[in-house]
């Protein structure tokens, strides 16, 4: 049984160039009690986070300040977008020291195993096949909880070395130990369990935490290669 | 009593859209999201309107592309892909299928084939657009 942590709703940043899909994902997220911000491009997403393409190194110096200004618990992005694809955005986030721990979910209308694997290898936490369903939303929270646990582990380590607490996150810093049971009460469908949240268990290699997930519907479209257009 | 009659008409329309395969379970998903109530009311109408506007624009763009002396099939691909995505998200199954049918023609770089495929997409779109518009009128 999980210990309920009373805090503000989790904030999800949704990125999609299609206005219809943005509307849909916003509704899905709000119905699932998330706070939502939608943007129509990877560039806007980075701007929102306070991350600028060229200044990735600078942003890491100001990480603390950035975290206070913008608190995003999860990023969900379309794969196929003009300009910066979801994959490009994923890479930028994972390259950033301030944001690499934010879980990233990729959405795509096409079930291409090589694409899925590429994203997972780059650090994506989850891959949703479009159209995204309400049932997919329940898969988001476990990733958020996992990353927050990691963040608190780092915070605890900092606490031991410094006396200063870094207010990098919201109210939950009041509870120093988060107890997460082995089965997430909100997620019964996929049988995924949150790894035993022993604070000392920091398997920092993201690849070990990533569960390869095929879309629930599993319609494998037998596709020949398509012409490239930012996909 | 007029409200009940309208309600019955709306239900009959919706049932018809499902049984003819014009819309699929994704549309049902949208309906159930609306039932969440409160801030979600009008969600289906909003999404349907976005789809109609989107599709109108895309179809016009594809027609313009096919009208060029030299057709840019990659752009046609991109537009059809976008329309397929929108129709899939809204649950407009027949439009989605028409888009999938389209692919072989731009891959083969056949202008004639594309024109035929576009005609099918347009026809399916007109059907569902009319039904959506009637639905929204009945809902008010």
Image (tube, coloured by chain):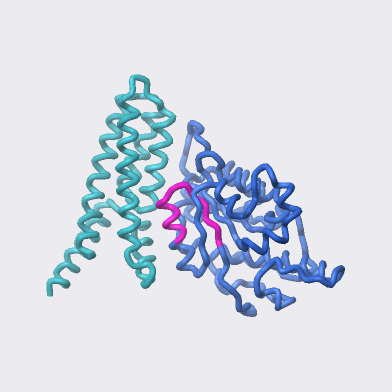
Chain colours: A blue, B cyan
Residue A36 picture location, percent across and down: 51, 62
Residue at the far left in the pictured view: B1
Residue furthest to the top in view is: B69
B10 vs A133, left or right, is left
Residue lying at 70% horizontally and 78% vertically, measured from the top left: A174
Point 63% across, 72% down: residue? A183
**Which quarter of the rendering shows the N terminus of chain A?**
bottom right
Residue A205: quadrant of the picture: bottom right
The foreground one among A229 and A210 is A229
Q: Position of residue A77 (x, y in %)?
A: 54, 51
User: From the viewer's perspective, is A128 left or right of B89?
Assistant: right
Q: Name the residue located 47 percent from the left edge and 37 percent from the top edge.
A: A223
- The verdict on residue A13 being magenta is yes
In depth, the one of A124 and A219 nearer the eye is A124
* Rendering quarter of residue A155: bottom right
Q: Looking at this view, name the residue that lies furthest to the right.
A: A161
Q: Where in the figure is residue B105, as x and y percent of width and height? A: 36, 29
Q: Is residue B113 magenta?
A: no
Residue B94 at x, y percent in the picture: 30, 46
Placement of B116 over or under B127, stated as above or below: above
What are the residue bounds of the magenta stretch?
A: A12-26
Report which quarter residue A199 is drawn in: bottom right
The structure residue drawn at horizontal position 56% and vertical position 64%, both measured from the top left corner, is A11
């Amino acid at each position: 049984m999980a210990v309920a942590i009373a805090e503000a709703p989790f904030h999800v940043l949704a990125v999609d160039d299609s206005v219809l899909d943005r509307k849909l994902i916003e509704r899905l997220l709000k119905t699932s009690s998330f706070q939502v911000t939608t943007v129509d491009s990877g560039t806007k997403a980075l701007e929102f986070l306070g991350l600028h393409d060229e200044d990735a190194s600078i942003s890491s110096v100001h990480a603390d300040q950035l975290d206070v200004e913008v608190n995003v618990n999860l990023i969900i992005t379309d794969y196929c977008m003009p300009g910066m694809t979801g994959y490009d955005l994923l890479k930028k986030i994972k390259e950033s020291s301030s944001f690499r721990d934010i879980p990233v979910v990729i959405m795509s209308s096409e079930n291409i195993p090589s694409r899925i694997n590429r994203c997972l290898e780059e650090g994506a936490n989850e891959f949703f096949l479009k159209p995204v369903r309400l049932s997919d939303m329940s898969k988001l929270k476990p990733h958020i909880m996992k990353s927050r646990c990691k963040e608190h582990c780092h915070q605890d380590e900092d606490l031991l070395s410094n006396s200063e607490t870094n207010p990098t996150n919201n109210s939950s810093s009041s509870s120093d130990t988060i107890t997460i049971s082995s089965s997430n009460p909100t997620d019964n469908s996929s049988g995924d369990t949150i790894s035993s949240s022993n604070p000392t268990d920091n398997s920092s290699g993201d690849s070990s935490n990533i569960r390869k997930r095929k879309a629930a519907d599993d319609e494998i479209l037998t596709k020949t290669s398509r012409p490239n257009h930012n996909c | 009593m007029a409200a009940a009659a309208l309600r019955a008409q709306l239900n009959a329309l919706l049932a018809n859209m499902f049984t003819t395969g014009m819309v699929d379970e994704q549309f049902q998903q949208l309906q159930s999201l609306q039932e969440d109530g409160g801030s979600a009311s009008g969600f289906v109408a909003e999404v349907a309107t976005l789809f109609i506007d989107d599709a109108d624009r895309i179809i016009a763009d594809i027609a313009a592309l096919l009208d060029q002396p030299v057709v840019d099939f990659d752009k046609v691909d991109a537009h059809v892909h976008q329309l397929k995505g929108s129709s899939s998200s809204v649950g407009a199954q027949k439009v989605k299928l028409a888009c999938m049918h389209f692919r072989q023609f731009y891959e083969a770089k056949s202008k004639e084939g594309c024109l035929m495929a576009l005609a099918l997409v347009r026809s399916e779109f007109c059907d569902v657009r009319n039904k959506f518009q009637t639905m929204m009128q009945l809902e008010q």
